[in-house]
Image: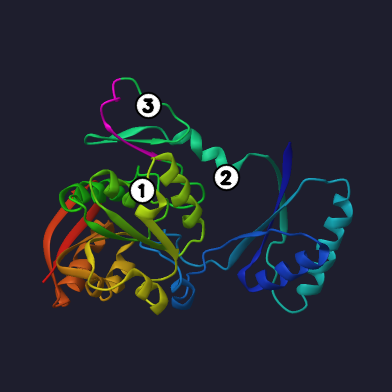
Amino acid sequence: MKWHKFTLTTTTAAVDLVSCMFDEIGIEGIEIEDKVPLTEAETKGMFIDILPDMGPDDGVARVSFYLEDVSDLDRIMKEIEDGLDEISRFVDVGARTMEASETEDKDWINNWKQYFKPFVVDDILIKPTWEPVPEGHEDKLLIQIDPGTAFGTGQHETTQLCIRQLRKYAADGAKVLDVGTGSGILGIAALKLGAGQVFGTDLDENAIAAVKENLEANGIGAEKFRVVQGNIIEDKEVQDMAGYGCYDVAVANILAPVIIFLQEEIPVHLKKGGIFITSGIINTKEEDVKRALASNRELEIIETTYQGEWVSITARKL
C-alpha cells in the first residue's frame, strides 16, 4: 500500500498558524522542516552532542502531511487554499507551493532489523535474537540483543569501548550501576563477564521491557539486573533506589553534556576505589569531559581509549 505525501512550502513565521489550520481540516501527523536554530530551552531536555550544520535560517519552512485516501483530495486542497488566504491576512505565507509524492507503507519500527547483523567485540559475539550464531563463532561469549524501541544494539563504537572497559573492571562479582541502560546491553555484558549484580536507570520507559526481554534471551535471572525509569541526576527517589557507596563500577554510555552533569552525582554511589566508565563522547568533546572529571576532587582519570572518532574516559573514585 502506498501513502500520498504532500509538502507545503511556507514561512517559519506562518508555521504555527498553518499547523492549526491543518488540524482544523482534519489532517494529523504533520512534519516540519526548517533551519531555525534550537533554543537553549528546547535542547535542555534533549541529549544532543553535535547538531547538523543546516546553514543560516532562511525563513522557509516545509510542512508535510500524509493521506492514505485521496478520494476527497479536491475538498482538502480547497480548504488549504482558503486557509492560507486567511492566514496571509496576518503573516507572510511565502511561496505556498504544494508538492505531491508517493511513499511505500513500510514497517518502520521493524525495517531496521535487516541492518543489524551478528558482530564480534574481541572474543564476544553480539547478535540479534532473530539471527543464528554464525559458523565458526560457536566458542565465543554470546550476548543476544533485541533493543525493541530502546537504544542499544552494541554496534556503535562507544558501546564497544565500554564493553572492553567492563571486561577490565567488572569481573569477580562486581556490583555495577548502568546509567542510560537502554536495551541493557552493557549491564548484560557486565554480567556475562563476571559481574554479580546490575542496577540500571533510563529515561525511556521502553528500556524496562527491553531489559526484561534481553535478560530472558541471555538466560539471566531478573534478580541479577534491576532497572528503573528516571533521571539519576535529578530524581532523589531514583538516587535512593540505586543506593550509596555500594558500586564497584558505574558505566554511562550517553553523551558528553550529560556526563559533565553526571560526574557530580556518580561518586556518591561508588565505593572508594570504584570505577566510572564513560563514553558516548565525540573526540571534539574529549577535553570538555576531562576538565569536568578533573574538577571533581573525588575522581581521578586513569585511562582514555579511542575507537574511530569516539572516546571512552575511565575514572576512579579516590
Residue at 24%, 44% in the rendered image: 193
Tag on residue 109? 2
Quick one: label 2, few (<14), some, or many (20+) residues within 10 Å?
A: few
Query: Is residue 139 shown in magenta?
Result: yes
Going from N to C along the chain, the mark reached first, 1 or 2, is: 2
The residue to which callout 3 is attached is 133
Quadrant of the frame with the C terminus: bottom left
Q: Which residues are magenta?
A: 136-144
Image coordinates for residue 271, horizontal then vertical, percent: 18, 69
Foreground: disc 2 or disc 3 = 3
Q: Which residue in the rendered view is the most extreme toward the top?
A: 135
Question: In this rendering, would 51 be left or right of 196?
Answer: right
Colour basis: rainbow
Image coordinates for residue 99, horizontal then vertical, percent: 70, 50
Q: Quadrant of residue 244?
A: bottom left
Going from N to C along the chain, the mark reached first, 3 or 1, is: 3
The residue to which callout 1 is attached is 185
